[in-house]
Amino acid sequence: WANAGAVPYRHLAAALDALEATRSRLSKEIILTNAFRVMLAMSAPAGEVEASCYLFAPAKDAQAGGHRLRPDWAEGKPLSLPHKSITAALLEATGSSKADMTRLYHELHDSGEVALALRERGGRQKLLKAPAPLTAGGVRKALLALSELSGSGVERAKTGRLAALLRAAQGTELKWMVRTFLPHMAVGISLEASVLPALGAAVEWQRTGRPRAEKVRSSQDEVRHCYALRPDVQALVTALLEGGFEAMRESCTLQLGVPMQPMLAKACSSIPELQKRIRGALPEKAVTLAAEFKYDGQRAQIHVLRNGDVRIFSRKLDDMTYKYPDVISALKRSFRRQAGCVLDAEIVAVVPKTAEGAESEKVDIAAFQSLATRKRKNVTANNAAVAVKLFLFDLLFLEEPLIGLPFVQRRQKLRENFQALEDVVAFAEVEDLEADCQPEVLEATLRRSVAACCEGLMVKRLDSGYEPSTKRSDCWLKLKKDYLESLGDSLDLIPIGGWRGSGRKSRWISPWLVATYDPDEGTLGSVCRVMSGFSDKFYKENTIKYLGREIRKGPEAEKVEEKEEDVEGDKSASEEPVEEDLEEEVLEPESSGLLLKRPAPGVDTAEQPPFWFQPTEVWEIRGADITISPKHMAAKGLVDPKKGLSLRFPRFMRKREDKGLHQATTPTQLAELFRKQGQHR
Ligand code: ATP
């Protein structure tokens, strides 16, 4: 700690080493809390603690391609470098050969460990004079500057800067620096669920000497709540360090321009269950519900700033303002006042009246997928290829925060201050019902929503406040049209492995192995093999994405191809994929950056696919029902002590680009769906 309170990067590396060595959630909590307690004892400045939070937290997702070093919603490029540039920087920093690196990779299967081994052997590095020790603030600053580089020769410049940083890394700092660039840090912690709450616990330790366990818990919860309201690490850390919990509560309120965590709904698989759950602990009390149509589009949190500027944030809190200039101009016309406000809404793709295929006088709601084809950049109100309509359902701020008000009042303010504009802005269709109404009444509303091309209903208590949180609330329940079929909800799963396809698909990965994610433990439990619902284009693009190229055809595969017919829809999850000819497919890990030589850390499965992947994205999968499985280990221990849960007849629906790993289906949710399925039957 030589450098006037600056946090040595080696302090973080030591904590990360310890975090990696344990799977116990409590141990991870203690390690992180102690790491922060040392920082507080050394009077580390807020900027250093902020940098430490970001450097501890694992990657957000593949798009960010590394650590989230600034808020999701803030401007600035993500920290990303092609795998080959990272390799080049490492070779330059350690003075090693490519052959050495490839050999070590086959032995160690991990880029961070490879980096350590290369440095151990490297010639050039050893001759250099040891550079000045790295600090958390210094590393974050250097990485942010690196990500901002642009212009010609940018990759070479980035490689050079990274090589300089890697050269300065001592001990296991090198391993963690390399891993910072990989999509997944794999130590089983996240900024909002573990890192920031640990800082809260450390502040509580500092305040009271030796706090009781409940005090530690409540301080962690308070930090989570404040961060959900204002996901701004800098604001939170500064307030907490300078003025304690009181200052944090004062500073972390809903701010115009800063998206808060949206309120989330729990899934229900039957109407009786919904009626029971929503009444809560006081079943005798009369409760009125708003049964709103559930539109199938993209969640949008819209902030109208006091100067009239508008910003639109996604479900993951990314800024997507530039994608929707048409929504902004429609919203401005719809707003009856000039004031700062925050809205919760859904943007839905529509087929305009004039377009061929539109059936009614009004616009028709189009498939969700068409939103994905909308350009991300340089969209203008006139050139937006996919027409959209905005469905408003909540008002969260109008001159002042409204989230403490009951929904019925927020909704009234919403209707008073905005007007519907034909074809472009509407209020979510709703029916107010008593919670103890006849189930047929709710079912009729559900059927009406499905007939209007919606996904089902969002049922909300009219007396509830708005709860910004990553945890789902009992005051909002979702009832999907799947209820009318079978399983109450689709699953959001993560591809973690795959097999080589047979016949027509022999160049592609099929099936894919998908998993749930437990954000608290950092574990991934396999759920099923998916081989249905994909287009050929999808197979090709994603095989190249995950493997770096298509798979070479073997003679066996060609023979099968002539005979095979596409019976995809009928294939069950237990079908064995083709595994021959795999020896010739020695794919280098750097070919895609997503291919691993062994399961990603935290993966639990009895499956043995030839290809393992870095878990980076979320796919929506639908299935017939959930069964107990000896092969798939998702939710192991929750329903059966040794077996997990699997999905029968899985079918791929779409990629959930609006979701990161932390929003995927958790083992607890899967177990809940399994249990509900029994009740439903
Ligand atoms: P989430 O994790 O947000 O619940 P999910 O993938 O589970 O996402 P869904 O089950 O499809 O999503 O349902 C929740 C989503 O439904 C919301 O995030 C929002 O985007 C959308 N939605 C559509 N209509 C409404 C509505 N009237 N009220 C609230 N949310 C709505």
Image (spheres, grey):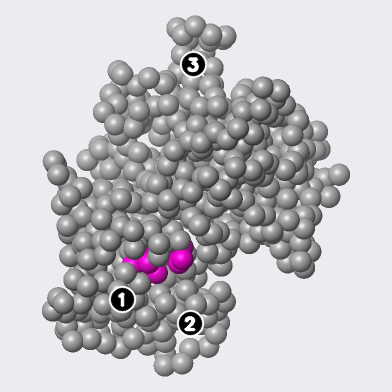
- Is 426 or 627 nearer to us in this picture? 627
Residue that badge 3 annotates: 351
Q: Is residue 610 magenta?
A: no
Task: Tell me where residue 450 sits by quadrant.
Answer: top right
State the mark number for residue 120: 1
Q: Position of residue 56 (x, y in %)?
A: 37, 69
Disc 1 on helix, strand or loop?
A: helix
Quadrant where the N terminus lies?
A: bottom left
SS assignment at label 2: helix
| Label 2, label 3: how far apart the Cα atoms are | 54 Å
Q: Residue 30, which numbered label?
A: 2
Q: Is residue 427 visible?
A: no
Front in this rendered view, residue 675 or 257: 675
**Where in the figure is residue 334, as x and y percent of width and height?**
37, 27
Residue 213 at x, y = what percent?
A: 55, 85
Q: Mark 3 or mark 1: which comes first in sequence?
A: 1
Q: Amino acid at mark 3?
A: Val
- Judging from the image, what secondary structure is the residue with disc 3 in? strand
Farthest residue in the bottom direction? 209
